[in-house]
Amino acid sequence: MKTAIALGTFDGIHIAHRSVLSIPDGYKKIAVTFLKPPKMYFADKDELIMDYEDRVKALEKMGFTDIVALDFLKVKNTSPKDFLDFLVAEYNPSLISCGFNYHFGKNGEGDTEFLKKYCDNFGIECRICEQVNIDGEAVSSTLIRNLLKCGEIEKANSLLFQPFSFSAIVEHGDMRGRTIGFPTLNQYYPENLVKVKFGVYKTKVTFNQKTYDGITNIGIRPTFKSERVISETFIKDFSGDLYGENVKITLKEFLREEIKFASLEDLRGQIQIDKTK
């Protein structure tokens, strides 16, 4: 069977990524990616849309049998030619696919023109996928991060392979939710993910292969301030102990910004309103 390689970081696997990943039938599909986007090695913090484990699962659903995760720090000084020589020697591809703005090799010196000439010399088919625009905007991971930061979760989700989500261990909270009749599931928001707009979201809550409707507050809790970003979720139609469990929260709709309440009774009244949405 012939082999096809898709090149890219694929953070979020948005619709522009999917054009690169749409390899025709009849090929063994290999995705060559990075553990995290190279740009993040030059930033103060990570802002991933999707963690690596979820990226792998999504690529496997798309039919990729091998996911090669490169360590940027180990390959950043490799010349463009040496990088492509490695791919050809290791995987013998008949087709290489990438986006119009893909760069590779030391200092990003390799570009699509370099790749096309290289592929022509070796008789490899080269697919360069064009920019994808939605509502006049170029679809990119940067655009989606900005949408998430602004609370435009529905638009962001429409561009992603799957709705934005995160998983985290359920921690012991301060039990205030129980005192007002709305026990919450407390999690620390993953530090490596892009920080969504603080506020209250309509969510889906998944654990033990079951999914429930939820209402989730993400932020620093202005009423009872926290040093870390906290996710607090009220699960509709569920009662039970989930401490220590790894629970997935999928964001569906932004409902409102965080509010500092004057009293527990005011907080209870607002949660009562939120849970009806």
Image: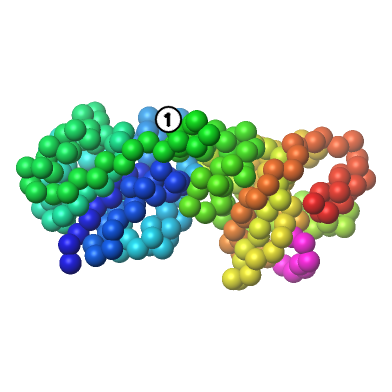
Pointer 1 local density, CA inside 10 Å: few below 14, some 14–19, many at least 20: few
Give the answer, above or below, for where 42 lies relative to 14: above
Image location of residue 105, percent across then percent down: 21, 35
User: Residue, x 47% and y 42% (percent of image)?
Assistant: 48
Give the answer, above or below, for where 108 lies relative to 216: above
Question: Hey, which residue is sitting farthest front in the picture?
Answer: 135
Tag 1 residue: 43
Looking at the rendered image, the quarter that the N terminus falls into is bottom left
Q: Is residue 261 left or right of residue 103?
A: right
Q: Is residue 60 magenta?
A: no
Magenta segment's dominant SS is loop
Find numbered disc 1 in the image and state the secondary structure of the residue it sits on: loop
Q: How many marks overall?
A: 1
The kind of residue on which mark 1 rests is: Ala
User: Residue, x 26% and y 41% (percent of image)?
Assistant: 128
Residue 78 visible from this viewpoint: no
Q: Quadrant of residue 78?
A: top left
Question: Hey, which residue is sitting farthest left in the picture?
Answer: 121
User: Residue, x 71% and y 40% (percent of image)?
Assistant: 199
Q: Is residue 36 left or right of residue 128?
A: right
- Highlighted range, magenta: 235-241
Image location of residue 197, percent across then percent down: 64, 36
Question: Hey, which residue is sitting farthest right in the picture?
Answer: 265
State the residue in front, 45 or 256.
Answer: 256
Image location of residue 228, percent across then percent down: 64, 40
User: Residue, x 22% and y 33% (percent of image)?
Assistant: 111
Image location of residue 249, percent across then percent down: 62, 55
Rendered image coloring scheme: rainbow
Give the answer, above or below, for where 141 lies relative to 247: above
State the residue in front, 275 or 169.
Answer: 275
State the residue in front, 266 or 97.
Answer: 97
